Amino acid sequence: MNEMLKAVFNKKLPDFELAADFSMDREIVAIVGPSGSGKTTFLNCLAGIADPDAGTIVLDGRTLFGKGRTVKIRDRQVGYLFQDYALFPHMTVRGNILFGLPGKPEPPHVTELTGLLGIRGLLGKYPREISGGEKQRTALVRALAMKPRLLLLDEPFSALDDATRIKCREELMRIHADWKIPVLLVTHSMDEARRVATRIVKIEKGRMDELPAGPALLS
Ligand SMILES: Nc1ncnc2c1ncn2[C@@H]1O[C@H](COP(=O)(O)OP(=O)(O)OP(=O)(O)O)[C@@H](O)[C@H]1O
């Protein structure tokens, strides 16, 4: 396996310790587990929002954390779609997407993504003027705008109605087929994990375990 991401680290949380031992290729891996089990903390450590107490995180051969080194968030090239989308309310869809990108002209891949996700007509609107599904698409384009080497999605579809959720999932899978970057998807839904991911990892009280693939085992 061509290992794109390897994360082996520990982080103390109030009630237990997150013990991450995880690696992945250019695939979609679902992270499941009960509320408060450490899923978001795991993503935060990968993104650089939180630091492990000890261990290493290596992405595409580059050490992001460990061996006396902590690469800053903005230098990690990790795209992160937060649980609540976290769009800036005072910025338009275009402003949100291009925030943090150097230079003003819209890069061609952003034009392509906004076209693919059908939000070109919304670029001048503000988050309060668009629907949940449109916010989700905007947040996804923003997470992809800086061409990340790793994409983290924290319950990206949970606030959407069924039809929009199915459409957004399909779009994600199409983008993944195109970009072929590793994608980590936190979800509460086993059904979603099974539909979208090639592997499923369960976190429970900070312990990670790979679940065997196969619908019968994933009820
Ligand atoms: N910055 C923090 N300070 C103190 N405690 C924290 C912090 N971040 C997380 N925790 C605690 O660590 C545990 C794991 O939280 P985390 O958000 O990673 O869980 P989760 O699996 O993502 O939960 P959910 O599914 O509800 O989003 C929880 O008990 C939480 O209260």
Image (spheres, rainbow, N blue to C red):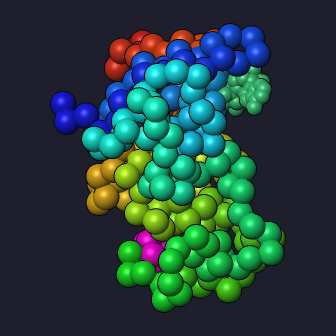
Q: Nearer the viewer, residue 38 or 126?
A: 38
Instruction: Tell me which image quadrant ligand 1 sits in.
Output: top right
Q: In the image, what residue occupies the spot 71% across and 63% down?
A: 87
Q: Nearer the viewer, residue 102 or 159?
A: 102
Q: Is residue 112 magenta?
A: yes
**Residue 34 visible to the viewer:** no
**Residue 95 visible to the viewer:** yes
Q: Is residue 4 magenta?
A: no
Question: In the displayed structure, would residue 49 be above or below residue 54?
Answer: below
Horizontal and vertical percent position of residue 35: 70, 23
Horizontal and vertical percent position of residue 181: 33, 50
Question: In the displayed structure, would residue 167 be above or below residue 123?
Answer: above
Q: Main secondary structure of the magenta part?
A: helix
Q: In the image, what residue occupies the spot 36% across and 15% down?
A: 212
Single out the residue that lies furthest toward the left: 1
Q: Nearer the viewer, residue 63 or 31?
A: 63
Residue 108, located in which quarter of the rendered image?
A: bottom left
- How many marks are shown on the rendered structure? 0
Q: Which residues are magenta?
A: 110-117
Single out the residue that lies furthest toward the bottom: 105
Horizontal and vertical percent position of residue 192: 51, 36
Residue 94, located in which quarter of the rendered image?
A: bottom right
Question: In the displayed structure, would residue 45 be above or below residue 135?
Answer: above
Q: In the image, what residue occupies the spot 46% across and 22% down?
A: 55
